Image (spheres, coloured by chain):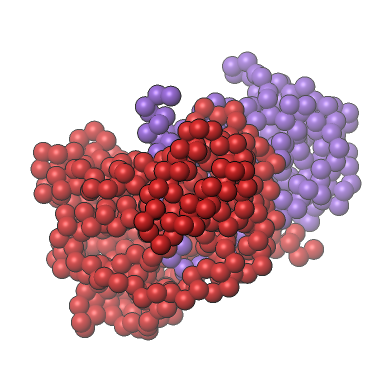
Chain colours: A purple, B red
Amino acid sequence: MDNDVVAWERRSVTPVITPVRPRKLAKVPFVELAEGRLQGVVSSGSDIARVYVSSITAVEHGLSCSTNNNRPCGGLRGAAPCKHLQALLVEAELQYGTARVARYLRIEVAQGQDLLSGLHPSTAPNQAAQVFSSFLRHLTYLELPASTDPLPELHWFPASPAVPSAQGVADAG
Amino acid sequence: MLAEALGAPPEGVEAAVTVVDGLDRALVHGLSRVDDEGAAALEATAAAFADSPPGERIAEAVGKILAGTVSDEHLVALAAARLALLAAAHDALLAQSDSALGRHRDGVIPPIASAPNGIPVAGCRSWLRELAIAGWRGVDRELASAAAQSVQALLPDPGQRRLAVLLDGLTAELQAVAPVAGQQRVPVRRWADLWSRALVLSQPTVAGPAPATPVDGRLLVLGVDLHEHPTVFRAQVHGLLEQSDGVRLVRTSIAAPKVDTITGPSAWRMLAGFPVLLGALAQRRAVELSGMPLTPSGDLIWDDAAAGAGEPSDPFTVAQVRLAGATAMSTAPLDRHPAVIAEPVLLQGYTPNGAGLELDGRPLPVAVDRIPAAGPLTRELVGASTACIGLLRWDGGRWAVQPLAVQVVQKKKLVTVHTADWALGPTEAKAAKDEAGAGMAVAVLRERAGRLLRT
């Protein structure tokens, strides 16, 4: 093992996750790479109370899209991604960067091609309930009260730097 | 001569850290199959405590783990041994920094009573045991997310915020990296730090909150350290508390839950519930305190209602005139670790030099990774600066300075730039425009939460 790796491994405070990039959330309020899927929530263009819950599994590229009330998305026919899944993929690239999304989903694309062209989609079981509850869990953080405790463990978590100098572990591979 | 006094680690620190390193290596491959090297490291840990009161418990835990039994009791003995070694390193390093800075420190913290921990911590404890057994290399996506429900159960209880914030930070990293087996490198020290602290905080009984005493006085801000992970943003203010009987070096902390897509300058919006403090930071004012609780470790437990905006106060003048004579306070016993050392310091008369500052002909590295995107300070400004207020930090075997504010000559004028200048929003046109766009994220998510969480 080279000396740089050893020195890095002996640090208490070192960036592990590349911070996500800010993006506009109006259309796709939630995107995450979790549970072996790219998953997220896409706001309906016509009904303010309705959202679509969309996901793409890693490796198999299994597609799923339905409303939060479990109605299947009319735009998802067979293995062609609907507009919600397309929007999900575009916003995931903004949030995480193309390379990280491609690596997670195992999409191989030629330089300059978009990720959509590298999908070889199949259909996947409906994951709406799980993804939607993940989104609701995400939203509950905005409702928790602030804390004035000294929280000493936050010394391990400096605020995202203006210019990340070292890549996180997840980007090393 | 500061850089010289901090040049070499104090006696004993390297020895303690070497034992910790061995223990941390054993956690990489897990305690279910400890190899010869790992066994030697565990035995070295037991040997380090051979003549001290917890020695017997640690030796027993090591023996049982090597024999193949990994129980909660054994793991907490190991975690406590690790904490004790790093606490000793913390004490030696803080003494070195105090002596280099000529800083006087109030000695002893009164013992803190233990209190029973809540029920949800049992789930956290068993997840932490699974992690130790599997080792970091054995963490797959399933194990990385297995703590989600236990952490969820901690969130509503303000008394468990410390553990919840810690576990949220650790699980986010494990989830981003899993499966860890395929990664080239593992943050060995870091994850062992977070794991051992989480394990100690999730025991059936833990130290209760430190007793705080209400104080009156004036808080003069020196600088603001910003902390963040996907679900929290925190501003920790370092300042001087002026009272009738003297001046103390204190901190105060405001932390808000958030989500990963709220980051950079927009994160300040999450702290909008503290207008008095944010206003004082953005406008560089002193704060008048009346009945604000202060703990023996020097933490003011912030309450906006006990504070009022004071006179304008320039942090560089405060540091120049008052910092040297201020009394520092001691770290709470369980918190002692080199990574929590954050000693305010005023640096002048240096030459910026690559990734560091040259002080009296000696290099002092700058922790550039700790210059936050949420404020106007940049590494270029640090590189052009003539004076700096920062925090002395120790990590990776050396001291470095984390800049909180600089003085720099721009267009023939001396200007000062602070990490918290944007506490009420960016003051620079382009950053303000970017923030206005990104800041909509908060409004969008609040609207979605309002509509979807209650249906």
Is A90 rendered above or below residue A107? below
- The answer to whether any part of residue B52 appears in the image is yes
- For the point 68% across and 48% down, the residue is B146
Position of residue B20 in the picture relative to residue B393 (left or right): right
- For the point 54% across and 33% down, the residue is B35
Is B336 rendered above or below residue A62? below
Quadrant of the image occupied by residue B363: top left
Of residues A166 and B32, the one drawn nearer to the viewer in this rendering: B32
Q: The C terminus of chain B lies in which quarter of the figure?
A: bottom right
Residue B335 image position (x, y, % from top left): 41, 61
Residue B162 image position (x, y, % from top left): 52, 62
Of residues B55 and B200, the one drawn nearer to the viewer in this rendering: B55
- For the point 70% across and 56% down, the residue is B149
**Farthest-out residue, top:** A110
Quadrant of the image occupied by residue B343: bottom left
Residue B197 image position (x, y, % from top left): 49, 55
Is B154 rendered above or below residue A114? below
Position of residue B438 in the picture relative to residue B300 (left or right): right
Position of residue B278 in the picture relative to residue B316 (left or right): right
Q: How many marks?
A: 0
Of residues A167 and B21, the one drawn nearer to the viewer in this rendering: B21
- The answer to whether any part of residue A14 appears in the image is no
Residue B87 image position (x, y, % from top left): 36, 56
- For the point 53% across and 52% down, the residue is B61
Position of residue A26 in the picture relative to residue B169 (left or right): right
